[in-house]
Image (cartoon, rainbow, N blue to C red):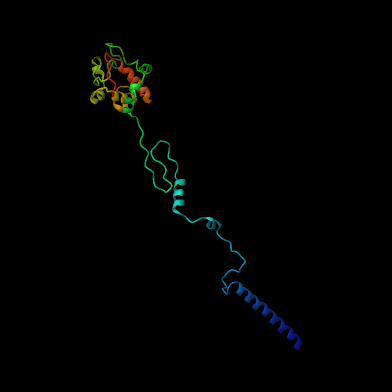
């Protein structure tokens, strides 16, 4: 091998070395000398979900709680939490209010109650001195002691006789709304009246079944 061939080989190796050195210099300049730093101009892929999600705050946490909580059923009892996650106070319990029925008596129409009484007529007499039938005569029932109809005394249930007291307006309202709820063990087979206005009308009619109707409550 002559000197010319050796010179060509040496030149090629020197050129390759210069390319390698130049490349390292350029890369080092673009990465500030840190070989682990990505080359400028190239953006590494990121976690899209993590990048787009804003940092959690107290308000956001509260909204998440509210959104995750199903709406309270109508009526029930409990309400959904407030936006800050604080549980709301439970709703007031509902139920039948006999006192509210008594308050309606002054405006109640006995004629409407007479129509309601047709449900009772198959068992209860409503004429003065008429004999009791399947159930006691209701003439004079308002403010009469419970279990006191003379010709029916032997037929009253033990539960009713043990209840005691008088058939006040409020007691009549409770009994007419739910007989077995007011006196467990009563012989009364009627399921009761749900509408307070209908109960008030019926009691207003029962009040007329007397020589001297009982005074209305104040």
- Report x, y in % for residue 202: 34, 20
Q: Is residue 167 left or right of residue 191?
A: left
Residue 20: x and y in percent read 65, 77
Residue 117, position as x, y percentages in the image:
36, 17
Residue 39 is drawn in which quadrant?
Answer: bottom right
Q: Quadrant of residue 41?
A: bottom right
Label tally: 0
Q: Is residue 169 above or below residue 66?
A: above
Residue at image point 54% right, 58% down: 51
Residue 174 lies, with reference to residue 20, above or below; the image says above
In the displayed structure, would residue 99 be above or below residue 57? above
- Is 29 on the left-hand or right-hand side of 102? right
**From this viewpoint, is residue 59 visible?**
yes
- Look at 33% across and 23% down and name the residue there: 176
- Residue drawn at x 73%, y 86% is 7
- Residue 189 visible? The answer is no
Residue 68 drawn at (x, y percent)? 46, 46
Q: Quarter of the image containing the C terminus?
A: top left
* 117 on left or right of 65: left
Q: Nearer the viewer, residue 21 or 106?
A: 106
Q: Quadrant of the N terminus?
A: bottom right
Q: Taking 27 as reference, is 69 left or right? A: left
Which residue is at 61% across, 74% downward? 29
Point out the residue furthest to the front here.
218
């Amino acid at each position: 091998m002559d000197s010319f061939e050796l010179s060509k080989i040496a030149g090629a190796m020197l050129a390759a070395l210069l390319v390698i050195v130049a490349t390292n210099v350029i890369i080092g300049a673009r990465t500030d000398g840190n070989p682990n730093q990505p080359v400028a101009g190239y953006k590494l892929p990121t976690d899209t979900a993590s990048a787009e999600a804003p940092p959690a705050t107290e308000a956001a946490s509260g909204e998440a709680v509210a959104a995750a909580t199903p709406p309270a059923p109508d009526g029930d009892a409990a309400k959904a939490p407030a936006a800050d996650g604080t549980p709301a106070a439970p709703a007031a319990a509902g139920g039948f209010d006999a006192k509210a029925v008594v308050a309606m008596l002054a405006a109640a129409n006995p004629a409407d109650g007479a129509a309601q009484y047709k449900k009772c007529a198959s068992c209860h007499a409503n004429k003065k001195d008429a004999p009791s039938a399947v159930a006691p005569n209701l003439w004079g029932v308002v403010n009469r002691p419970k279990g006191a109809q003379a010709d029916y005394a032997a037929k009253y249930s033990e539960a009713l006789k043990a209840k005691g007291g008088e058939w006040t307006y409020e007691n009549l309202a409770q009994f007419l709304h739910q007989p077995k709820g007011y006196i467990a063990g009563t012989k009364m087979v009627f399921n009761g009246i749900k509408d307070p206005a209908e109960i008030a009308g019926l009691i207003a009619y029962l009040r007329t079944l007397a020589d001297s109707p009982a005074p209305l409550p104040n």
